[in-house]
Every structure is written in structure tokens, then in C-alpha cells.
Image (cartoon, rainbow, N blue to C red):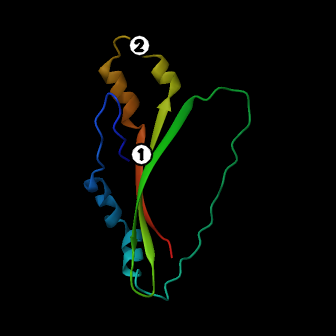
Amino acid sequence: MPYQKGKRLPIERASKLGHLEVIQSPLVKKLCENFNDPNFKIEPTEINWQPIPKCGNELKIIFASDGSIQTIESPIPPYKAIAFVKSALLRMDQYAISKLDKENPNPFALRDIMKKSALFHATSFPLR
């Protein structure tokens, strides 16, 4: 997701190339094929929610997420809309970060921390 222009940084533009994975997804292909099919029905999936444990310990790992959405609508009956979504997840290991030298962090240590810290997912949703 692009960020707005600030006092120190110029505006960031979102790259359309970052969404190429979306159109390669089997789910997205199926939704696109059925985009103009009025008989297409979405099958609900079961979600297995896990409760968050409530304890007094500090968080060892912090997650942050970001995403973008693009909606496409069909202007002719049957009026349909589909949204293409891409999201990213960043995991920060507080313990690993606390072990870094604050003035001169080792680039290899930074690489190891960041190697598995970012994930992304692309999909689409029928809106109507």
C-alpha cells in the first residue's frame, strides 16, 4: 500500500506489478470465470478461530499488517462486483531485535531477522 507524501519523503506510488500473483491464483481464476454467471454460488468455509491467551507476559513477537484493494464492477445486468486484495504481514521478533547493536547493527544479523519476517497473500472476493 503506498504512503502519502510527508515532510521528509516523496509520495510512494503503488506498483501494479505487485498484484500479478493475484491473477495467477486458482481461486481468483475461478471467480473471474464465474464473474458473469448469475447462478454462481459461493460455498461458505468453516473458520477455526483460536482464542488469544490472557496472561501478564510481555509480547515476544509483534505482527503488523497492511493491504490494498481494487474493485471491478460489471455495469450491465446481472450487476456484479469483485474485489482483488493483496495483504502483507510483518513479524518483528523483539528479543532478536534487542540483541542487535543499536549504533552499528550487524547486516547479517539484520538479514537473518528479516528473512522470514514478511509474508504476503493475494486473493479476490465477490462483492455482489
**Residue at left offset 41%, top offset 41%:** 118
Q: Is residue 84 above or below residue 43?
A: above
Amino acid type, residue under disc 1 in the picture: Leu
The answer to whether residue 79 is above or below residue 58 is below
Question: Pointer 2: residues within 10 angstroms few (<14), some, or many (20+)?
Answer: few
Instruction: State whether residue 47 is above or below residue 113.
Output: below
Disc number for residue 59: none
- Label placed on residue 119: 1
Q: How far apart are marks 2 and 1 (CA)?
A: 26 Å
Nearer to the camera, 67 or 13 = 13
Residue drawn at x 41%, y 80% as measured from the top left:
35
The image quarter containing residue 9 is: top left
- Return the residue nearer the eye: 85 or 21: 85
* Amino acid carrying mark 2 in the image: Lys
Helix, strand or loop under label 1: strand
Residue 24 horizontal/vertical position (percent): 32, 65
Q: Mark number for residue 102?
A: 2
**Residue 104 lies in quadrant:** top left
Residue at the image point whose x is 43% and y is 50% from the top: 67
Find numbered disc 2 in the image and state the secondary structure of the residue it sits on. loop
Are the residues flagged by discs 2 and 1 in contact, CB closer than 8 Å? no
**Residue 93 at x, y percent in the picture:** 50, 29
Residue 39, position in %: x, y? 50, 89
46 lies above or below 38: above
Crowding near the residue tagged with mark 1, few <14, some 14–19, many ≥20 C-alpha atoms within 10 Å: few
Q: How many marks?
A: 2
Disc nearer the start of the sequence (2/1): 2
Give residue 17's position: percent from left, percent from top: 25, 55
Q: Which of marks 2 and 1 is in front?
A: 2
